[in-house]
């Protein structure tokens, strides 16, 4: 049936027909009111921006798919270097567009080394891990970190795949190096663990800025991202030659989980669980590696219900 100029609130929602009169305000401004129950259900508020587009004879009114970053002020006074890290990272992941980090002392204690470091240096180390943000202003007691590149929702799938592929490259290259007794090659392979962390933080930030199609998908994706980050952390700690068999088994689990996540089917699910069972039965398997692999499998299990 030809389109008769219906108005949609979102392209993936059920369509409700309703006639509304066009109201003329001042000059050439025309206004169409929205039904109050629709406004309430969608959580729309006065002054909020919406995206309006035209598709043929249809007018599409949508809430912005990605929220703009907000400005936060953070008092880092009295925190050690690790807590400075977590405080800034938390606001970054939450989607802040600008973080104004204030501090009353120039030096903070690093609990990992027991040494005092400049607070500014501690903050700069954090910012190195924040994709899309840079320090734009600095004084004796304040550092401003601002978003310099906006979150593009269409890039999310690419970022998610990069997290997976970086983890896969890390464990497969590391496994091959250990199998050859190449300790330096293993160290080189696991250095990308830092890239995994950066990409995971960025992907979580994108989720909090509203790139997911719905809340359920966002929760599942977040769990997968956390499990991959944990997996990479464990792999980076495996430097002994005795870990090579377990590492090889872990690589097979991750590869099968990747296949299932991006193309879920009964066959790929069966392959994933079989790889995990083989890893569990390996003699001398590292419990931490097995637990990390199990975490990934459990996280990706809902993929088939997400319509991937």
Image: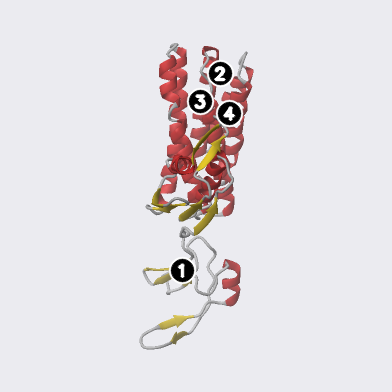
Asked if the residue at tag 2 contacts the one at tag 3, i.e. Cβ–Cβ closer than 8 Å, the answer is no
Residue, disc 1: 50
Q: State the image coordinates of residue 34 (x, y, percent, origin top left).
A: 52, 77
Task: Looking at the picture, tell me which residue is in the foreground, 231 or 123.
Answer: 123
Give the alpha-carbon distance from disc 1 to disc 2, as whole Å. Answer: 52 Å
Whichever of labels 4 and 2 marks the residue nearer the N terminus, that label is 2
Q: Residue at x 50, y 73 (%)?
A: 47
Q: Residue at x 36, y 69 (%)?
A: 56
* Label 2 residue SS: helix
Residue, disc 2: 246
Left-right relation of 283 to 2: right
* Label 1 residue SS: loop
Q: State the image coordinates of residue 45 (x, y, percent, origin top left).
A: 55, 72
Q: On the image, which quarter does residue 265 sit in? A: top right
The quarter of the image holding the N terminus is: bottom left
Whichever of labels 1 and 4 marks the residue nearer the N terminus, that label is 1
Task: Looking at the picture, tell me which residue is in the foreground, 147 or 9.
Answer: 147
Task: Looking at the picture, tell me which residue is in the foreground, 245 or 301.
Answer: 245
* Label 3 residue SS: helix
Whichever of labels 3 and 2 marks the residue nearer the N terminus, that label is 3
Q: Residue at x 62, y 23 (%)?
A: 277
**What mark, if any, has residue 293 been given in the picture?**
4
Give the alpha-carbon distance from disc 1 to disc 3, as whole Å. Answer: 45 Å
Residue, disc 3: 236
């Amino acid at each position: 049936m030809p389109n008769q100029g219906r108005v949609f609130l979102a392209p993936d929602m059920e369509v409700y027909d309703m006639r509304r009169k066009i109201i003329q305000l001042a000059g050439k401004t025309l206004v169409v009111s929205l039904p109050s129950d629709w406004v309430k259900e969608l959580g729309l508020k006065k002054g909020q921006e919406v995206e309006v587009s035209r598709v043929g004879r249809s007018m599409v009114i949508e809430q912005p798919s990605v929220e703009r970053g907000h400005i936060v002020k953070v008092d880092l006074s009295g925190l050690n270097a690790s807590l400075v890290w977590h405080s800034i990272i938390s606001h970054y992941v939450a989607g802040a567009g600008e973080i104004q980090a204030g501090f009353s002392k120039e030096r903070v204690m690093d609990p990992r080394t027991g040494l005092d470091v400049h607070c500014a240096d501690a903050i700069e180390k954090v910012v190195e891990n924040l994709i899309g943000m840079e320090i734009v202003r600095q004084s004796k007691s304040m550092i401003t970190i601002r978003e310099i590149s906006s979150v593009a929702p269409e890039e999310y799938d690419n970022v998610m795949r990069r997290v997976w592929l970086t983890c896969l490259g890390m464990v497969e290259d590391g496994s091959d190096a250990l199998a050859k007794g190449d300790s330096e090659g293993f160290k080189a392979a696991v250095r990308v663990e830092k890239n995994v962390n950066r990409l995971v933080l960025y992907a979580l930030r994108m989720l909090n800025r509203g790139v997911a199609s719905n809340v359920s998908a966002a929760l599942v994706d977040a769990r997968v991202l956390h499990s991959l980050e944990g997996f990479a952390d464990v792999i980076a700690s495996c430097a002994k030659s005795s870990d090579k068999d377990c590492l090889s088994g872990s690589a097979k689990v991750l590869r099968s989980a990747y296949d299932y996540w991006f193309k879920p089917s009964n066959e790929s699910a069966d392959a994933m669980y079989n790889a995990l069972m083989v890893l569990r039965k390996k003699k001398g398997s590292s419990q931490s590696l097995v637990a990390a692999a199990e975490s990934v499998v459990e996280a990706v299990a809902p993929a088939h219900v997400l319509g991937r």
